Image (cartoon, grey):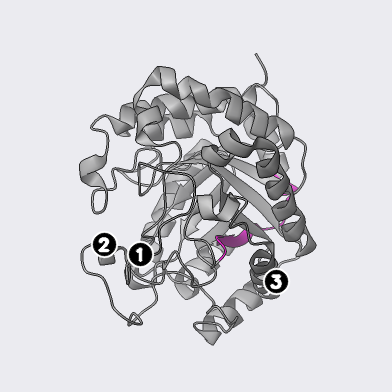
Amino acid sequence: MGGERWSKERATQWYANQPWLVGCNFLPSSAINQLAMWQADTFDPETIDRELGWAESIGFNTVRVYLHDLPWSEDRDGYFKRIDEFLSIAEKHKISTLMVIFDGVWDPDPQSGLQRPPRAGVHNSGWVQSPGRVLLADPKKQDQLKPYVTDLVTHFANDERIVIWDLFNEPDNPNTSSYGPLELDNKDEVAAQLTRKAFGWARSVNPSQPLTVGVWRGPAWDNLKDLNLVHQAALELSDVISYHDYGTPEAMQARIDELRKYGRPLICTEYMARGHGSTFETILPILKNEKVGAYCWGLVDGKSQTKYPWSTWQTPILGEPELWHHDIFNTDGSPYRQKEVSLIKELTSSESNGDEK
């Protein structure tokens, strides 16, 4: 049957052996989505190398990266070779990788091949879900994904360059403001089914890395019975607890306090939306003080256009936004705000590479 959920003791010991995990969600600026990042025609190791160098320069030691099932189904060996090349580039920059296998956000109908260009002034206009809604909707079709998960995790099960497997990003996201009319009415139900299956499939090959699925919305997270099916599965099955919070410092602290109940290491896999009060100045010191892993959204302004706010799905912004929503660097490597980069360097340089826990 494979492995079981890590004990709290094992998870705690694993975390004690890690440095403070501090980094970003990473997509090279030349890619509009996961498919553009990983398909052979648009895989861009030169940009990846350059931009991870900027991440290293401010003290980031980890990145969160999204995979996709379609490249595996069409070019398994090439896909794995490109993942290996990415991991080698990251390792060169002293950066570990948190790998996201599935994703429930944005376009529910992904298609291989040349990806569409960005929509002017719109946040993340080309991002795609994995799997698409056709597979997600049918529990029997979901099972077609088992060979992908087991092959992927088996191939990298003992790869020290991978720090965590994040099995499914925001599985139940209804994408109300963008693709809502195309979404499944029972998405929480079917996404929870795939979430539980993914944990079982990944555990069956006993990877050396912990498994997680993040919680990201809803009422207080310290009472499982109040949560939807996806959030219940995430908190019941994750080896280490991960979560997203784009709110104020008070909201971040409240979420941390709620999740402490579970007695497991905490990783914030998404934060930093300047217009919502989630900034490096207000949030990163909290995460460091609480010894919570910290992955902001975004590194370099690029085709994903996440410098624009979520509201641009309704009202695009032509030209430069008044305030960047996400991201740290321009495409030439200059920082959006020097004071932010200086703060990040200060907080990461004072970290003692895991000796201080």
Q: What is the magenta range?
A: 15-28
Near mark 1 (Cα within 10 A), the count class, few <14, some 14-19 or many ≥20, is: many
The reply to whether the C-beta atoms of the residues labelled 3 and 1 are less than 8 Å apart is no
Is 135 situated above or below 209? above
User: Is residue 223 visible in this depiction of the protein?
Assistant: no
Residue 2 numbered mark, or none? none
User: Mark 3: which amino acid?
Assistant: Gly
The reply to whether the C-beta atoms of the residues labelled 3 and 2 are less than 8 Å apart is no
Q: Which residue is mark 1?
A: 123
Task: From the viewer's side, name the closer residue of 109 and 168.
Answer: 109
Q: CA distance from mark 2 to mark 1?
A: 7 Å
Q: In the image, what residue occupies the spot 39% across and 54% down? A: 254
User: Mark 1: which amino acid?
Assistant: His
The N terminus lies in which quarter of the figure? top right
Q: CA distance from mark 3 to mark 2?
A: 32 Å
Task: From the viewer's side, name the closer residue of 39 and 158.
Answer: 39
- Residue 205: x and y, percent? 69, 24
Of marks 3 and 2, which one's residue comes earlier in the chain?
3
The reply to whether the C-beta atoms of the residues labelled 2 and 1 are less than 8 Å apart is yes
Q: CA distance from mark 3 to mark 1?
A: 25 Å
Residue 313 numbered mark, or none? 2
Q: In the image, what residue occupies the spot 72% across and 56% down? A: 19
Of marks 3 and 1, which one's residue comes earlier in the chain?
3
User: Mark 2: which amino acid?
Assistant: Trp
- Residue 18: x and y, percent? 72, 51
Of marks 2 and 1, which one's residue comes earlier in the chain?
1
